[in-house]
Structure formats: C-alpha cells, structure tokens
Image: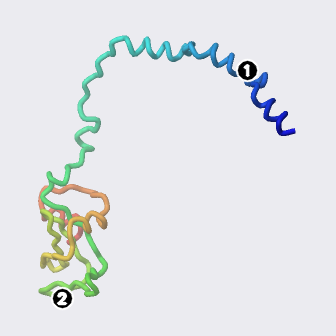
Amino acid sequence: MFHRIHRRAKEPSELQRQHYETWVRLAGQVPQEVERMRAAADQPAEPAPVVDDFLPPELRVPSHDQLDGRMMPWTQPIVLDGDVVACAECGAYRDWLILSIRDQIWLRCRAGHQQHETRLNTAWYNRHAGPADAIHATFEDCLRHLGH
C-alpha cells in the first residue's frame, strides 16, 4: 500500500501541472502599472520648489543654545538623597523656581535667594519641565510672569 502511494507521489498532479504552465506563461510578463512607473521614472523630474522654513516666524521657538536659560515653578518640597532641600538663607523648603542656566541648576526661593544645586542636572530638569509657555527678554520679566 505504501508503495502505491509513494509511486503516485512521483508524478505531478493535474493541478500542479496547470499551476506550473500558468507560472511559465506569466514569468515573462510585466504588469502595466510597473511599465507606467518605469516610464515615469525615466522622465526628468521637475525641480522641487524652493520654500522657506515651513513655520512662520511667529511660531518658531528658539533652540536651547539660543536661550540664556530656562525656569519653571516647583511648588512642592524638593527631596534629594532623603533630605528636604531648604534655602540656605531663609530656610524656605517649598515654592521654588528652578533655573536651568548653562548646564547648571539653581534654586530660587520666594524671598529671592538663589543657590546652586549640584545634585540636580539638566537631564533632571528636562524630564520634569513642561513645554515653555512664554519667552521673555529679561530675567525680571520671566520672574513677573511666574509670579515671583
């Protein structure tokens, strides 16, 4: 019985023969869409129009290297290495302005005292800062905008 099955498997079936004949017939043909695409690729392309930047000037945001610094409000206490950060001069421990200036982080309390915080870095600032809502010409303008 296995010999008969094995012998029958040596010969291709009618369906396999039809499939092979169709494949041989279609092998040399190229679809019309491909011919159209090849013809379009052979034609010289029109030069792309030269356009100014895609954003109008009033929507452009300066890059980090064009700014003197960035700041964000931070109302809750800052805890670093298990210690609550407090102002060295007045002892305030909440309602900070966090300033990122030239790869340094500075903390400014409500009373206007500033202290350099070496345990924070620009990467920390970037993770916690939201999008900028305004750009100011002076430091004092930014302080007024943030309510300090």
The percent position of residue 80, horizontal first and vertical second, equals: 26, 81
Quarter residue 78 falls in? bottom left
Residue at numbered disc 2: 91
Quarter residue 129 falls in? bottom left
Horizontal side of 84 relative to 114 (left or right) equals: right
Q: Is residue 20 above or below residue 77?
A: above
Question: Which residue is painted at 30% across and 67% down in the image?
Answer: 128
Label 1 sits on a secondary structure element that is helix
Q: Is residue 40 above or below residue 120?
A: above
Farthest right residue in view: 1
Label 2 sits on a secondary structure element that is loop
The percent position of residue 98, horizontal first and vertical second, equals: 21, 71
* Residue type at the position of mark 1: Arg
* Residue type at the position of mark 2: Gly
Q: Are marks 2 and 1 in contact (CB under 8 Å)?
A: no
Horizontal side of 71 relative to 5 (left or right) equals: left
Horizontal side of 50 relative to 69 (left or right) equals: right
Quarter residue 94 falls in? bottom left
Discs 2/1, front: 1
Q: Which quadrant does the N terminus fall into?
A: top right
How much space separates mark 2 and mark 1, taking CA atoms? Answer: 91 Å
Question: Which residue is painted at 28% across and 86% down in the image?
Answer: 82
Q: How many marks?
A: 2
Q: Nearer the viewer, residue 26 or 143?
A: 26
Q: Please report whichever mark, 2 or 1, sits nearer to the chain's N-terminal start.
A: 1
Q: Is residue 62 above or below residue 109?
A: above
Residue at numbered disc 1: 17
